Amino acid sequence: MQLDALAQPYFLTAFQRIVSRIEESLRETPETALPVSMYIFGDGAVHFYTGERVSIKIDATFFHRIALPDNLEVSYRAPDGAAKLLYFNRQFNDSFALVHEDAYRDSVPLELREIDSKVLDVRLLSALDLAVSKISRLADHDRQDIASLAKLRSINSNSLRIRAEEAMKSYVGHLARLQTSIDLACNIVATVE
């Protein structure tokens, strides 16, 4: 499946403009430090898989310390004429999401036109790891996103439980709440299977 095939064209254009600004800021980086890997989480990543619920922000983490450029927001018009804004979420922190230790290794490349992957390697979490990352908060829209991924047969309840419980082994804190969220997420997926 081509990952950008389901994305709304206006979202994809705005997304590419922001990513190209990041890539442009890396052009003078020594080759030995390239490529910089950028991992997309959140609603934006779900949109690439499902084409549903257009995001207003890009949640991402990098495998380098990076000084981001200014102007990482793009305004555009949706097909209904409404003014929209897509911005890079500078406050995103993957430490608060449930993330499996292999999530970055198992991520999938997102090929974007005019983005040189030898400079900026843009990747989406796999559909399974994206669903796992939604479990820690499990707000209403996270539940909807998990159900949307399940409807596409991108995930199933058994693999979600296994991956989430493996991820939980490296976490500390209020794990009982997290286990309850895993159970709820697996039930959401099971109703779609």
Image (cartoon, helix red, strand yellow):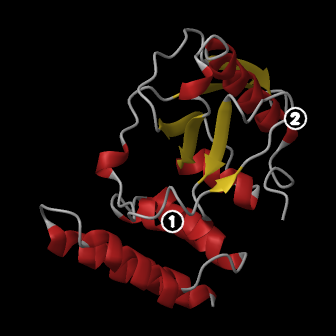
Q: Earlier in the sequence, mark 2 or mark 1?
A: 2
Q: Quadrant of the N terminus?
A: bottom right
Location of residue 94 with respect to 32 vertically, above or below: below
Location of residue 23 with respect to 1 vertically, above or below: above
User: Which of the pair 30/126 is nearer the observer?
Assistant: 30
**Most distant residue in the left direction:** 173
Viewed as shown, does residue 142 lie left or right of 176? right
User: Which of the pair 149/37 is nearer the observer?
Assistant: 37
Q: Residues within 10 Å of mark 2 (few under 14, many from 20)?
A: few
**Most distant residue in the front direction:** 32
Viewed as shown, does residue 74 lie left or right of 56? right
Picture coordinates of residue 151, whole percent (x, y): 69, 77
Q: Secondary structure at mark 1?
A: helix
Q: Amino acid at mark 2?
A: Pro
At 87% from the left and 35% from the top, the residue drawn is 79
Residue position for label 2:
79
Query: Dividing the picture into quarters, in which one does residue 3 lie?
Result: bottom right
Query: Dividing the picture into quarters, in which one does residue 80 lie?
Result: top right
Tag shown at residue 129: 1
Location of residue 73 with respect to 119 vertically, above or below: above
